[in-house]
Amino acid sequence: MADEVKFFEVWAPTGRMKMDKETKQEKPEPWARVGVAFPLKDGTGFTIKLNSLPLDATLIVRPPRPRDGSDKAVPVPEGI
C-alpha cells in the first residue's frame, strides 16, 4: 500500500522552446504540468485541479515520476 499512487500529474502540450542547460541550445519543451488528479474513493473517476488551462484543451493524466529523476513509473493501484 505504501507504493500506491495517491495522485496523478496532469500534463498539457506546450509547443514552447526552452534552453538546454548543458548544450546552451534551444530544444522543444513538449509538456507542461498543469495540475493534479486525485482518484475518487469509489474508484470510478477523478477530482482534477488545474493550475492553468491548455489552449488546445488536450490533457494527459499520468502517475507521478519519482523525485530521484528516474523514468521508472510509480505503480498504479488496481482498479484505476
Image (cartoon, rainbow, N blue to C red):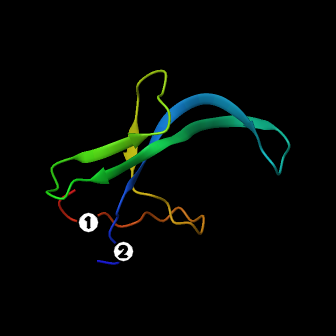
Q: Is residue 65 above or below residue 57?
A: below
Locate residue 62 relative to residue 20 in the image: left or right.
left
Mark pair 1, 2: CA separation: 9 Å
Which residue type carries mark 2?
Answer: Asp
Which residue type carries mark 1?
Answer: Pro
Q: Secondary structure at mark 1?
A: loop
Residue reaching furthest bottom? 2
Q: Secondary structure at mark 2?
A: loop
Question: x%, y% of residue 44?
Answer: 15, 50
Question: x%, y% of residue 46?
Answer: 26, 47
Q: Upstream in the sequence, badge 1 or badge 2?
A: 2
Residue receiving disc 1: 77
Q: How many marks?
A: 2
> In the rendered structure, are the residues bearing label 1 and label 2 in contact, judged by CB atoms less than 8 Å apart?
no
The quarter of the picture where residue 16 lies is top right
**What quarter of the picture does the N terminus occupy?**
bottom left
Residue reaching furthest right? 24
Question: x%, y% of residue 57?
Answer: 41, 25
The quarter of the picture where residue 41 lies is bottom left
- Residue nearest the observer in this picture, 52 or 15: 52
Q: Is residue 37 above or below residue 13?
A: below
Q: Residues within 10 Å of mark 2 (few under 14, many from 20)?
A: few
x 82%, y 38%: residue: 25
Question: x%, y% of residue 69?
Answer: 60, 64
Q: Residues within 10 Å of mark 1 (few under 14, many from 20)?
A: few
- Residue nearest the observer in this picture, 74 or 40: 40
Residue receiving disc 2: 3
- Residue nearest the observer in this picture, 76 or 38: 38
x 35%, y 48%: residue: 37
- Residue nearest the observer in this picture, 26 or 54: 54
**What quarter of the picture does the C terminus occupy?**
bottom left
